[in-house]
Image (cartoon, rainbow, N blue to C red):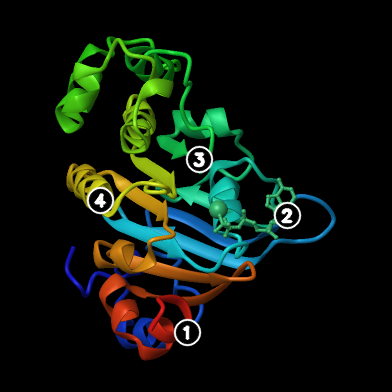
């Protein structure tokens, strides 16, 4: 997680640093997860305009930007919930653009959407079991790992998920996503509506998950705090890449600070 780690382990470091907008992608050495020049939307109008998002193995990549910038839409596009009019999505260099979300889960992706990300009328444990629905092997070990990461979920495993606090529900949502043993974990605003302390705790757990080698791609409203733990950050505006750089350099950029981080 060094500050110099760049997309695609590119050698063109200065170009990456200097470039405003999207990342530089080395086609000979593509990033582990890549949504490349994505264009698409919900109806006739495009929401994403040549939007490129990349994430490296074991790194935390954060997408920030104003409300309505297309952050969730970019996540949906990468997960296959949106038909692209142009562009492609690759994982480990493999083109998965034609695949359904369920098929992408089989390819190692897990997605925690911004809303409705748990089953409130099921217990915590049932939520975790639901997460593993594609697996045919023994899920006990993975469930134990989730409980080690989030001990409170073990305590409350027989409680209805809908009865938990906001932060605990987000833990259920993340835990459920981990049940498929993903290589890529995508989180849309995992800290929405939680207190600063709970946010910090959740970010610590996300760092822990990344350290196990899982690729994290996360949208965050708490932009400053998220960029502090980000290896790479993307600022999206109106469905376009506006800034791409390491989290540290985005945080240090006066223009990014003034326009997107509240000064
Ligand atoms: N299901 C949908 N149908 C039609 N338009 C949509 C739909 N979801 C989002 N949009 C529109 O697409 C644009 C981008 O929305 P999106 O939810 O991707 O933004 P966002 O950056 O995630 O915003 P927020 O920070 O509020 O979560 C907005 O103009 C929004 O109104
Ligand atoms: Mg959103």
Task: Mark 2 and ligand 1: say if the CB distance to the nearest ligand atom is below 8 Å.
Answer: yes
Residue that appears at 27% across and 54% down: 196
What distance separates the C-alpha of mark 3 from that of mark 1?
28 Å
Image quadrant containing the N terminus: bottom left
Q: Residue at left 61%, top 53%?
A: 73
Q: Give the vertical position of 88 relative to 11 (above or below).
A: above
Residues at discs 1 and 4 in contact (Cβ within 8 Å): no
Mark 4 close to ligand 1, CB under 8 Å: no
Badge 2 vs badge 3, beta-carbon distance below 8 Å = no
Q: Secondary structure at mark 4?
A: helix
User: Can the viewer see residue 139 in this picture?
Assistant: yes
Residue 113 image label: 3
Residue 219: image quadrant is bottom left
Q: Of tags 1 and 4, which is closer to the observer?
A: 4
Q: Position of residue 65 (x, y in %)?
A: 50, 68
On the rendering, which quadrant does ligand 1 occupy?
bottom right
Left or right side of 245 for 105: right
Tell me the element at label 1.
loop
């Amino acid at each position: 997680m060094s500050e110099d780690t760049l997309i695609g382990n590119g050698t063109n470091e200065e170009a990456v640093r200097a470039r405003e907008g999207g990342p530089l992608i080395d086609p000979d050495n593509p990033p582990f997860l890549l949504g490349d020049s994505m264009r698409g939307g919900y109806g006739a109008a495009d929401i994403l305009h040549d939007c490129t998002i990349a994430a490296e193995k074991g790194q935390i990549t954060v997408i920030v930007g104003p409300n309505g910038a297309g952050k969730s839409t970019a996540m949906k596009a990468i997960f296959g919930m949106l038909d692209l009019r142009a562009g492609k999505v690759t994982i480990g260099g493999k083109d998965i653009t034609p695949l359904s979300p369920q098929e992408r889960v089989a390819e190692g992706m897990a997605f925690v959407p911004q809303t409705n990300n748990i089953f409130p009328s099921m217990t915590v444990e049932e939520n975790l079991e639901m997460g593993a629905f594609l697996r045919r092997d023994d899920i006990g070990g993975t469930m134990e790992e989730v409980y080690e990461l989030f001990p409170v979920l073990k305590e409350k495993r027989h409680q209805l998920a809908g009865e938990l606090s906001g932060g605990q529900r987000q833990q259920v949502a993340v835990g459920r996503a981990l049940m498929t043993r993903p290589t890529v974990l995508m989180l849309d605003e995992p800290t929405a509506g939680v207190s600063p302390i709970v946010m910090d705790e959740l970010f610590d757990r996300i760092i822990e998950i990344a350290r196990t080698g899982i690729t994290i791609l996360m949208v965050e409203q708490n932009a400053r705090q998220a960029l502090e733990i980000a290896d790479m950050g993307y600022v999206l505006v109106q469905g376009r890449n506006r800034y791409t750089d390491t989290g540290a350099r985005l945080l240090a950029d006066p223009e990014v600070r003034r326009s997107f981080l509240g000064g």
